């Protein structure tokens, strides 16, 4: 799957991923009204509105982008119905030939970690039938429990030809409370980055590992260090745009081949119609606003990083 992701990035010249992190407040009123008319003001109605909203954004952007990244918490807040919307979103994105990165941030040990891995990346045997639950192409993984928590994911990835992105240095302001703590003479995030590179050596694609890393755009100097520590690791970069990360700061995340990183934007894309820059599109054309925002993001990043 890493080979496919790299190929799509090269073909589209678009090292970007759209984060499908919907809140009801982002969903235009006309979509909500239609869903509530059919299902009532219920969790099912909310989930239907979320899926229809996602579908519009996917339809408007799939030819521009290599991947989407649905954040599962935004769906779990609506319970089982929300998880149905998550699954429908994954399936619809894949029907449009998009790579799907499930932002699930799971991390446990032993059979529990294996169950997470099977549920999101693999298949579970039901009688004589192999069934697939969520079936994303990549997922995000929390490494805090060590190799016991990560290796089960790598095992399933090896069987399925899929991948993971391991949290190394996240974009949120309080990440340094633990990630920046010194262990001897070095910060913890560097040690995690080195371990990610080692894990990656066990599951390599053509040029990059199936074991990627998450490194926030809000810490470019740290990103520069981690890029050197993980030369064969693909970096998923959150924090661009709404969280303060700027395109000019992204060059250190990429390798000399122009690859090695994929930059995420969530509400900056999916709620673009709410921004002053795109307000002329209005609610009815929210998806067109998202398309315009994607095009602007691609131009912003490629002009800053590659020219």
Image (cartoon, helix red, strand yellow):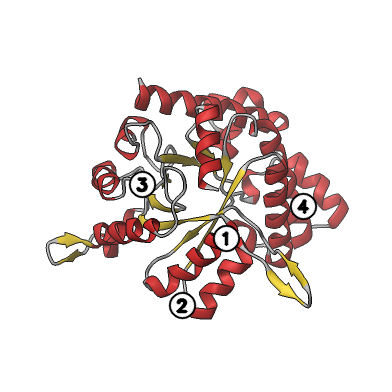
- Secondary structure of the residue carrying numbered label 4: helix
Q: Which residue in the protein does label 2 denote?
A: 109
Q: Disc 2 vs disc 1: Cβ atoms closer than 8 Å?
A: no
Relative vertical location of residue 114 with respect to residue 10 in this rendering, above or below: below
- Picture coordinates of residue 89, whole percent (x, y): 69, 50
Q: Which residue in the protein does label 1 denote?
A: 73
Instruction: Give how far apart the Cα atoms at labels 3 and 4 are.
Output: 40 Å
The tag earlier along the polypeptide, 3 or 1, is 1
- Secondary structure of the residue carrying numbered label 3: loop
* Residue located at (37% from left, 56% from top): 201
Estimate how packed mark 1 is, as few (under 14), some (14 to 19) or many (20 or more) residues with alpha carbons within 10 Å. some
* Residue located at (43% from left, 64% from top): 142
Of tags 2 and 4, the one toward the viewer is 2
Of all residues shown, which one is farthest toward the right? 38
The tag earlier along the polypeptide, 2 or 4, is 4
Instruction: Give how far apart the Cα atoms at labels 3 and 1 are.
Output: 30 Å
Of all residues shown, which one is farthest toward the front? 206
> Looking at this view, is 107 or 37 the one in front?
107
Relative vertical location of residue 215 with respect to residue 178 in this rendering, above or below: above
- Secondary structure of the residue carrying numbered label 1: helix
Relative vertical location of residue 154 with respect to residue 225 in this rendering, above or below: below
Estimate how packed mark 4 is, as few (under 14), some (14 to 19) or many (20 or more) residues with alpha carbons within 10 Å. many
Q: Which residue in the protein does label 3 denote?
A: 232
Along the horizontal axis of the image, is 67 left or right of 243?
Answer: right
- Picture coordinates of residue 229, whole percent (x, y): 26, 50
């Amino acid at each position: 799957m890493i080979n496919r992701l790299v190929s799509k990035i090269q073909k589209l010249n678009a090292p970007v991923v759209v984060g499908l992190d919907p809140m009801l407040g982002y969903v235009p009123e006309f979509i909500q009204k239609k869903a509530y008319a059919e299902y009532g003001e219920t969790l099912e109605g909310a989930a239907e509105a979320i899926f229809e909203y996602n579908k519009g954004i996917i339809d408007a952007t799939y030819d521009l982008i290599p991947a989407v990244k649905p954040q599962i918490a935004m769906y779990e807040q609506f319970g089982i119905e929300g998880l149905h919307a998550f699954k429908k979103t994954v399936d619809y994105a894949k029907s449009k030939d998009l790579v799907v990165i499930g932002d699930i941030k799971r991390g446990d040990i032993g059979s529990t970690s294996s169950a997470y891995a099977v549920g999101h990346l693999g298949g579970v045997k039901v009688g004589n039938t192999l069934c697939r639950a969520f079936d994303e192409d990549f997922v995000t993984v929390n490494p805090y429990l060590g190799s016991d928590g990560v290796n089960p994911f790598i095992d399933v990835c090896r069987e399925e030809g899929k991948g993971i992105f391991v949290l190394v240095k996240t974009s949120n302001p309080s990440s340094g409370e633990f990630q920046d703590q010194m262990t001897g003479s070095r910060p913890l995030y560097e040690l995690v980055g080195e371990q990610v590179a080692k894990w990656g050596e066990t599951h390599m694609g053509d040029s990059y590992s199936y074991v990627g890393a998450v490194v926030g755009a809000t810490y470019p100097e740290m990103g520069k260090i981690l890029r050197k520590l993980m030369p064969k690791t693909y970096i998923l970069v959150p924090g661009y745009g709404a969280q303060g990360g700027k395109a000019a700061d992204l060059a250190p995340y990429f390798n000399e081949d122009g690859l090695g990183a994929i930059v995420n934007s969530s509400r900056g894309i999916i709620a673009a119609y709410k921004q002053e820059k795109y307000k002329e599109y209005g609610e009815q054309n929210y998806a067109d606003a998202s398309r315009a925002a994607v095009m602007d993001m691609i131009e912003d990043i490629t002009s800053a990083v590659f020219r």
